Amino acid sequence: MKTIYALLCLTLVQSISCSIFMTKQHSQDDIIQHPLDYVEQQIHQQKQKLHKQTLNKRSHQHSDSDSDSASRAAASHSASQSSSSQSSSSQEDETKQVHDKMNVKHHSPVYSVIMKLKKEVDINHGDSVVWKNIEMASGPNSPVQTEQDIEDIFGDSLKTWDHFTDDAKKNTFHDAISETQRENNEDFHLNATELLKKHQYPVEEHTVATDDGYHLTVLRIPPTHQTRDDKKKPVALLMHGLLGSADDWLLMGPSKSLAYMLSDAGYDVWLGNVRGNKYSRSHVSKHPALNDFWKFSNDEIALHDLPAIIDHVLDISGQERLHYIGHSQGATTFFALMSEQPSYNEKIVSMHALSPIVYMNYVRSPLFRMIAPTSKFYQYIHDQVGHGAFEPGKHLIETFGGAACREKLGCRHVCNNLNYVISGINVYNQDADIVPVVMAHLPAGTSARVMKQYGQNVASHDFRKYNYGAETNMKVYGTSEPPSYDLSKVSAPVNLYHSHDAWLAHPKDVEKLQENLPNVKQSFEVPEPQHFTDLDFQFSKKAPDTVYQKLMENMQNNS
């Protein structure tokens, strides 16, 4: 099981590399379609070449002189014995020589392809490498700034390749999420309320109406009998990330997921759901089957959903302020709200941003780079995604995920999960048993506009409102370009939690966020060598000790 799971990480990295280096022919103007297949072919050819050179050398030595035939015979016999005794390792030695000749770092096939292509098509460090082509780009938008960047992105996961047998490499991840496991693990089918009841936690379901007609489902884990007293308990509002839902705060189970830990610590815990996810697909007049329901971006979530949820939570709990914990998109919309309606800063005791997506200059996710308006594939993806719900079809998912989506690589299920394709996965951080459960609950849904807005921010190098185009922008904003959010108005105490290895919330982008916020209490980077991805802040087995304990300490200090 763990071997199969480990292959998930490797295969996903292969998929990303395939989506970046993908074309039909090996020419100077094109990029390799299947990097690993190409490398295996190159290694095989190099090994044949080395073997041929060895045979030629031996043949040449054999014909050099006949005067010392006895010595040569003895030497030949000795060499034969040595070759026989070392047959199990000779192939590895030849492979190592090939890797050395191809400038491979960390035994990484993908790295060798990058460096080989660099020589053939003049890829310079700092250039942006995209699917089917090499798109020259300057500035921070490039994922390849130095050789170390390449090693950071590919090396760690690809090193695991050397640890697997040939038989293990043929296995598929399908076994990990077979129908048998689905039947045996009820968490596949339970919604957030059912998950809480399963673990004997009290739960309340609330429907919150926004001022523009959407109905949002918000869950409450009220204080337990063991912690209930006359004093009102502090309130913690947890807002999910991109394509997520309230489920995300519960899937790891008691003592592991943050919602349970906060409840056990005596907090009045609330789990929000924004418009468009599976718990919030209702409107007074719009039907989710029609595009009109989905005409919203992060701007509408920030200006309508969050105020309605915050006001409802404070009204029911009887408190005047709350602690806000936002993951990914949950942080995006928080900062947008606080900058547009500064009065809400007074309702926040402390804000805790887990892997916050705000500035996206250095984003590593191929999906977000491809949906940026500056991408050569923007129009194609724009046409495929449309204007309604973000529900990319199989062909588009294959574009995002590359060759890993193809059944022969055995990673169809993971590739079809957009959250992993967008954010990546680290084999060492998530338990094998939790991955299928996460995949059963994610993605929970969002609109095409939300995804496009992130792509717009990648291109603009800024934190802006949705770009409708110059003509509509003039009608909506009074300017041809969408205005930027003014983060100087975010006066609430903010704590940032990020990782060096996150694909979406790059450390340099988080640093820029910190510089533009006036009241950052702490910026906590997950210590190496944890290698947290964006999703690991919710689903890593290391999150409780590495992140949540620190977060809860900060909540107490900020109270």
Image: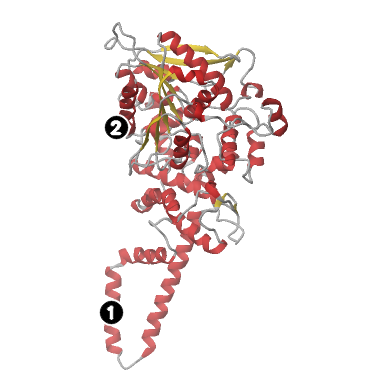
Percent x, y of residue 41: 48, 61
Q: Quadrant of residue 348?
A: top left
From where the camera sits, is residue 179 visible?
no
Residue 111 coordinates in the image, percent (x, y):
45, 56
Give 472 or 290, whichever is nearer the viewer. 472
- Residue 151's x, y, as percent? 42, 52
Label 1 secondary element: helix
Q: What's under tag 1, amino acid-wise? A: His
Q: Nearer the viewer, residue 559 or 415?
A: 559
Query: Residue 289 at x, y = what percent?
Result: 63, 22
- Depth check: 185 or 473 in front? 473
Q: Nearer the viewer, mark 2 or mark 1?
A: 2
Q: Residues within 10 Å of mark 2 (few under 14, many from 20)?
A: few
Give the crowd class for mark 1: few <14, some 14-19, many >=20 residues within 10 Å: few
Looking at the picture, the colour scheme in use is secondary structure
Please tell me the numbered disc located at residue 545: 2
Q: Is residue 118 above or below residue 473?
A: below
Mark 2 and 1 residues: CB-CB less than 8 Å, in contact?
Answer: no
Tell me if residue 111 comes above or below residue 346 in the rendering.
below
- Alpha carbon of mark 2 to alpha carbon of mark 1: how far? 61 Å
- Residue at image x 38%, y 53%? 166
Q: Quadrant of the C terminus?
A: top left
Look at the picture and state if 291 lies above or below 127.
above
Q: Could you say which disc has been placed on residue 230 in the image?
A: none
Quadrant showing the N terminus? top left
First in sequence: mark 2 vs mark 1: 1
- Tell whether 121 sits left or right of 3: right
Is any atom of residue 429 visible in this view?
yes
Q: Seen in the image, is 498 located left or right of residue 483?
A: left
Residue type of the residue flagged with mark 2:
Asp
* Local secondary structure at mark 2: helix
| Residue 77 numbered mark, or none | 1
